[in-house]
Amino acid sequence: MRFTVVSFPGSNCDHDCVRVVDAVLGEQATLVRHTADDLGRPDVVLLPGGFSYGDYLRCGAIAARAPVMAAVRRFAEGGGPVLGICNGFQVLTECGLLPGALGRNAGLDFVCDDVWLTVEGQATPFTRGVPRERPLRVPVAHHDGCYFADDDTLARLEGEGQVIFRYADAAGRPDPTANPNGSRANIAGICNAAGNVVGMMPHPERCAEPLLGGVDGRLLFDAVRGVLS
Amino acid sequence: MTPTPPYSPEVIRQHGLTPDEYARVEALLGRAPTWPELGVFSVMWSEHCAYKSSRVHLRRLPTKGARVIQGPGENAGVVDAGDGWAVVFKMESHNHPSFIEPYQGAATGVGGILRDVFTMGARPIALLNALRFGRPDHPRTPYLVKGVVGGIGGYGNCVGVPTVGGDASFDACYDGNILVNAFALGVARADRIFLGRAEGVGNPVFYVGSKTGRDGIHGATMASEEFGAGSEAKRPTVQVGDPFTEKLLIEASLEVMGADLLAGVQDMGAAGLTSSSCEMASRAGSGLVLDLDRVPMRETGMTPYELLLSESQERMLMVCKRGREDELLAIVRRWDLDVCEVGRVTDSGRFVCRWHGEVVVDVPVGALVDEAPCYDRPRTEPPPPTPLADADLPPMADAGADLRALLATPTIGSKRWIYRQYDHMVQTGTVIRPGAGDAAVVRLPETPRGVAMSVDCNGRYCALDPYAGAGLAVVESALNVACVGARPVAVTDCLNFASPERPAVMGAFAAAIDGIAAACAALETPVVSGNVSLYNETEGRGIHPTPMIGMVGLMDDAAAAVGSAFPAEGLAVVVLGDAPPALGGSAWLGLHGDALRGLPPRLDPDGARKVVDTLLAAHDAGLVESAHDVSEGGLAVALAECTFAHGVGVAADLSAGEGGLPARLFGEAIGTVVVATADRDALLALAQRRGVTAWFVGPTGGDRVVITVDERRVVDASVADLRAAWEGALPAVVAARAPVSGGGA
Amino acid sequence: MSEAGTSRGGMKGRVTVRLRPGVLDVQGKAIAHALADLGFGETEVRVGKVFEVSLDAADPDAARARLTEMADKLLANPVMESFEIEVE
Amino acid sequence: MSEAGTSRGGMKGRVTVRLRPGVLDVQGKAIAHALADLGFGETEVRVGKVFEVSLDAADPDAARARLTEMADKLLANPVMESFEIEVE
Ligand SMILES: Nc1ncnc2c1ncn2[C@@H]1O[C@H](COP(=O)(O)OP(=O)(O)O)[C@@H](O)[C@H]1O
Ligand SMILES: [Mg+2]
């Protein structure tokens, strides 16, 4: 199975994603640069975390306009599974493949910590079969992870089951105190209407090996592998 | 108009040169220096570049060892990590810029230390930082803390190098002079280390990275004739960090090095183009000619003087192998960086700069480097510390209350508020995160091995006894590394002191060097890189001597790394080591008045070595479930800290301890370790075989911290309550609102 | 390519980007708090960005058109932000 | 406490904070680059912040004086930034 990881100048979790794909999952990973017009026939596309273009304008804003995004859009519109992680999520909202926007954390500071996530929707290739009974423990590391969408959009997301992950406490309750960044409705991840494009602020690639203190993130990668094989 | 000689005494003074030094400049040149030459001498002969007050003493540090691939003298130290891998690391100060502009000062400190590491061909995989702030209630402290932490995070997070640990404490002596010491570590193949040498006559020299502006040009220029009244816009400006460009520079540099295109390379750090060029030429015994007008410039009207002295960030000087220029250009341009051929390596032994064809600098490299002043400044022996009489000890009314109060001081309290703002997991290699163990552990890419790192220094001990205090910083950092299960292998340092022109400061400096040397020798941890920061004082008030130590350790199996907190109930808690508890300079003394009294902990390098070896043997035997060294706040604080992460309490009986109650509980026995083990008998037997004192203090379990002495329950507190005090310490300091626009994107 | 404020084609403009009303301005709120702590009494603060752009353009109208396009395409995110153009 | 721009004591002002000339503007640099990539040609961009403040003040002069003080004390960092005040 082929995973393409899209790398923008300033992406810094691109190699972490490659590592999960090849060293942990044992699948094929290809790194594709921002200037590429071709993704190399992938089965799955990952948009990694980091600070594309320094995040100097808005997070993900400049990357969303990079040449490679045309190919990502084609792949997504063709139903291919796309996962945007952290900066990748920001890129997906900036280019309109996902609704809403990500703003400055409510606490104003960068937050790097483990959080708990409830899995709300299993209708995406990255969550199919992922257990909903217990929350997942996954790290976040971002300065601008506060999910915003207007009331109508939010109602639509909730109504259509497009909210995929919510910040929760260890018992799986989406408590406001468990929200690390002030996101509306504790939203940590969403998908598009078709369900094939998923964006999330937490970093599943950072908890896919026991050595790093957790393996819940691996469930997402295993899920997409299961769906495609 | 460019000033011309003769220069007024005032101008010479502004360039940091004494009349004697200036006379030597003229003698070496056989003429008066041109204006740009004066600038070049000014920076090359500065304390920062020439180590003129410290050099004679630094020679006493042990720098050799079986694992050392590169000791001091290059951009960073290099140590063999096994299987053909090397770790490359260094620590550096950015104290003054961080006091002026905390966000950018700290950020550019991180950028600078990263360049020192990747310039050697190593990919940076970890950052640490050691911070010293003034009193928690000083009006400027919250602003400085927020700015510095924001800047470190802002830079490190963006470049994608995890900040995995550090050290932070608060003391009135840093009110007017904070310390921001940044440490970086990278990995490289041991046979692919790059050196800062301008090798190969005729090789082209390339400037790579950001354009040059008037950033950070030293203060001398501010008052010099070059800036007439009203030339506000030309004022030298604060250095601004551009971590995005740094990230590109890392990737481009490593790619260029990987393609074997370079004969030498060096980052432009302090004193920018001047020091990078001269140091490279000096190390190679070559010369350089530069065409300054070709340097990519950010502003209009820049002069040769400014170009030579600018400290614009994110720039490198690369000596390309002749014939490989196009490959270099292609790589660097693909990373969207400015690049320009600015000169050539010569065999003249001279540093020559041209400006539109005209020679404006022509100086023997030796005059700038080898002939730089070197002083053995007058010094006075540090007075021996005086023991505290029992009568001088404050009475201890309530040990439980004291324990809680100590945990609530920001120096001892949790540093979570800090490291939560640092991406400590990027690169997916962090095995022991900040807060989880006594040292950070990061896996060495492509191997099962781990590298452990810790930075430490207790300035109060150093103020009382610089020899012991500096040695104890080595001991503490070595123990921290051993606690997680790694063998300490080498040291980098950052020696922060007040003015070397004061004999007492110089005496302390010399003594600190000897203390470090003694401890490093016993532990077989040579010093492979470091930095000296002098003149840390405001209005004649100096900081405590603060020789920060960064210790690096190695372990074969990163997965075997152990945390500091009790992981489970029913384990046996054993204290390893016989260092006597000391109250001199202790946090407990500080709780009840002036801490700067009495005898600090004793330095026993050989004893420390035995504890390190025993601890590592215990790790190898699988006898260590957790390990935490005793430091500020003593044994009681160490025990309490061990209960927080997993909420597992402890019942400790300290009757076998030494001294009165305060000493037993809060005496700082540097060199002892709290170990939790599942096999108490085996651990005690192992220690005994190795001649190391070990005593069982009690079992883990419950949800309270209970300490008894001679059948008296002196502490009985809930873990949750103590933890709340400990976690609240730093947030309370920064709760005071600070200016918002002090920097940051 | 110098940064030192040389204007190109004579034209200079300014794009001010603001958060839309209804979008929580956490920075503005924090600043209002800080101002209150400093004794400035109760205030309301909204934080925006201003981009000062020097560009080649034939005349102010052309400059305005291009700045509008820049804002639409890059400088503002319509989900959360609105913008305003001024030309010197 | 509403956020939606209700004014207090009638007064509204604006503090524009800019980097001093010569101070590296990393954001401006990246944005100019991005604009060029999007086909907008060569531009120069400097990024500033604008604080729109509603405050109680007797008259425009009083408002201006208070805004100046706010900028001095909090909104601008004199080491790197300069500011400008406008009152409605
Ligand atoms: N400035 C800092 N940056 C990052 N981590 C820090 C900093 N200061 C402290 N830490 C982390 O917080 C934890 C506790 O530090 P410290 O209180 O110094 O513990 P100890 O006394 O055991 O050395 C350690 O993991 C340390 O790395
Ligand atoms: Mg410490």
Image (cartoon, coloured by chain):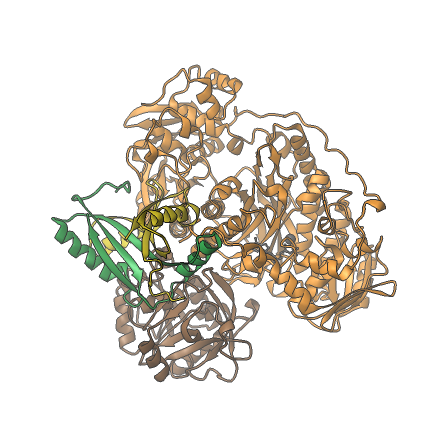
Chain colours: A brown, B orange, C green, D yellow
Q: Say if A215 sits above or below B532 in the image.
A: below
Q: Which residue is the extreme one toward the front?
A: D58
Q: Say if B87 sits above or below B271 in the image.
A: below
- Relative horizontal placement of residue B729, taking residue B357 as reference (left or right): right
Q: Whole-percent x and y of residue B152?
A: 49, 51
Q: In which quarter of the image is ligand 1?
A: bottom right
Q: Which residue is the extreme one toward the right?
A: B710
Of residue B444 and residue B133, the one placed in the foreground of this image is B133
Query: How many discs appear?
Result: 0
Of residue D3 and residue A173, the one placed in the foreground of this image is D3
The picture quadrant where one finds residue A73 is bottom left
Any part of residue A119 in sight: yes
Q: Whole-percent x and y of residue B507?
A: 68, 31
Q: Say if A71 sits above or below A157 in the image.
A: above
Q: Whole-percent x and y of residue A116?
A: 51, 74
Q: Which residue is drawn at 22% across and 57% down?
A: C70
Q: Residue at x 53, y 70 (%)?
A: A209
The picture quadrant where one finds residue B415 is bottom right
Q: Residue at x 82, y 63 (%)?
A: B685
- Relative horizontal placement of residue B733, taking residue B642 as reference (left or right): left
- The quadrant of the picture occupied by the N terminus of chain A is bottom left
Of residue B719 and residue B131, the one placed in the foreground of this image is B719
The picture quadrant where one finds residue B538 is top right
- The quadrant of the picture occupied by the C terminus of chain A is bottom left
Q: Whole-percent x and y of residue B669?
A: 76, 52
Any part of residue B674 in sight: no
